Amino acid sequence: MNKELKNRISTSVMITFLSLLCVIKGSYLFNIFIVLILCISLFEWLNVSYNKIIFSIGVFILFASILSTYYLRNSSLLFFLFVILISVSSDIGGFIFGKIIKGPKLTKISPNKTYAGTIGSFILSIISGLLYLNYFDHTLNISSNFNNLTIVSIIIFLTIINQLGDLIMSYYKRLKKIKNTGNILPGHGGLLDRIDGMIFTMLLSYPIYSLVLQ
């Protein structure tokens, strides 16, 4: 196991532990957590965006995403964790399937992404999402109100949004000719490198929850 992979794994474990602690604990700890994420993200976006208009659009999206994150966490912790699970599963599925199967590249925007990785993202997201809902459905009551096709459609939609967020960030990194948005996370790069997809899934998840599922 090389040094970069060790750093990547250890950083992932640390981030997962701290994030879950702040999310589950809630209250002021969660508020400080998302404000810190916003500040770091804004700083990294300043380095990635190439003009004032693009920077302003990004700032608006980041603020809107943080607000949606705040309201979703305070509305339903279980659905909030469900959205995080879908985003993380999408990233992990894409990484594992892409590394093992490889195959044709998906797009020039992000050379590391493959069709196999994209399919893997959907597979792992659907499996993990359904397992999660099956376990917590006595509290969420989603299955009693919606059929399986609707639930799978929501998971697929969130997975697509997560992947689009990743591609959007990859596009702007290519324009700036940089590999990472920063170096704050050993083995991962910048914070935006890790949450680019989640920014967009969180942005849309609170409207989905409040208008469709609640």
Image: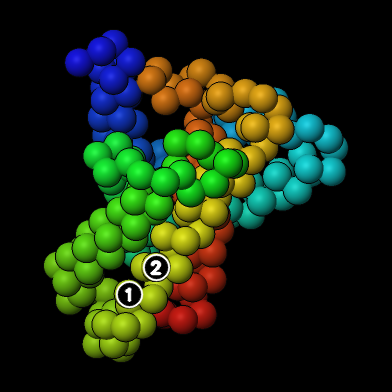
Q: Is residue 56 left or right of residue 41?
A: right
Q: How many marks?
A: 2
Return the residue at label 2: 156
Q: Residue 83: where, in percent of width, then height?
A: 38, 59
Q: Residue 38: where, in percent of width, then height?
A: 58, 38
Q: Is residue 8 above or below residue 172?
A: above
Q: Residue 75: where, in percent of width, then height?
A: 42, 66
Find residue 192 and report its image quarter.
top right
Secondary structure beneath dot 1 equals helix
Q: Is residue 78 above or below residue 171?
A: below
Which residue appears farthest toward the right when viewing the image? 52
Q: Coloring scheme of the render?
A: rainbow
Secondary structure beneath dot 2 equals helix
Q: Is residue 150 above or below residue 5?
A: below
Q: Is residue 121 left or right of residue 163?
A: left
Residue at the image point whose x is 54% and y is 64% from the top:
204
Return the residue at label 1: 152
Residue at the image point whose x is 22% and y is 68% from the top:
130
Which amino acid, by three-letter code, is at mark 1? Val
> Considering depth in this image, is 194 or 27 the residue closer to the camera?
194
Are the residues at dot 2 and dot 1 in contact (C-beta closer than 8 Å)?
yes
* Label 2, label 1: how far apart the Cα atoms are: 6 Å
Circle 2 packing at 10 Å, graded few (<14), some (14-19), many (20+), is many
